[in-house]
Amino acid sequence: MEFERVNPQQIVPYIPEFGGERRRACENRDYAPCAFHLRPMTVAEYERASVWTRDGDGFALAPDTVRDTLTRHVTRVEHLRFADGEEIADGAAVAAARERAGASAAPLYLEILAAIRDVSVLREGERKNSDSPRASS
């Protein structure tokens, strides 16, 4: 049996579906989408960050690890800002913004956390949105 090592330099661009962002990016080649650049978790990081649940897929993020997961696994963010213009440029800023964002942004955070999990556990060919030419690398 063989399994892959996590390459700490591997970064996977992810354009969220939230708010129709991915749809707009697909429909308009000139549109500069919001993109999160994600670093996969190692097995040890995955185990520390997750708790096993009975919600159907067996995975949920432990509540006290959300900030650390965002900070460590979102390496860069493009085209995301608060309505007042304040840029949100990396995982630390994403985690800090979570404390000030309205509840309507909760689905975006859940989507990004799920994307971090997906790029960590899915093989290259199974990753959704990982080969998007629209997000710069």
Image: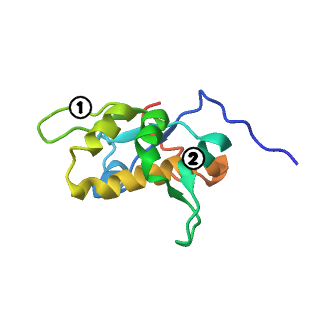
Sort mark 1 into few (<14), some (14-19) or many (20+) by Cα contacts within 10 Å.
some
Q: Secondary structure at mark 2?
A: helix
Place of residue 55 in the rendered image (x, y in percent of width and height, measured from the top left): 52, 71
Judge from the rendering whether residue 29 lies leftward or rightward of residue 7; answer left or right.
left
* Three-letter code, disc 2: Val
Q: Nearer the viewer, residue 99 or 113?
A: 99
- Residue 134 appears in the rendering: no
Q: Secondary structure at mark 1?
A: loop
Q: Quick check: 63 above or below 137?
A: below
The mark found on residue 87 in the picture is: 1
Q: Nearer the viewer, residue 134 or 13?
A: 13
Residue depicted at 40% across the width and 46% down the height: 15
Q: Do the CB atoms of the residues marked 2 and 1 lie less than 8 Å apart?
A: no
Residue, far front: 64
Disc 2 marks which residue? Answer: 119
Q: Is residue 92 left or right of residue 120?
A: left
Q: Is residue 93 left or right of residue 66?
A: left
Circle 2 crowding by C-alpha within 10 Å: few under 14, some 14–19, many from 20? many
- Dot 2 or dot 1: first in sequence order is 1
Q: Residue furthest right?
A: 1
Which residue does the image show at 49% across and 37% down from the upper left?
Answer: 73
Residue 130 image offset from top left, x and y in percent = 53, 45
Write the residue at 21% across / 44% down.
100
Residue at the far top in the pictured view = 9
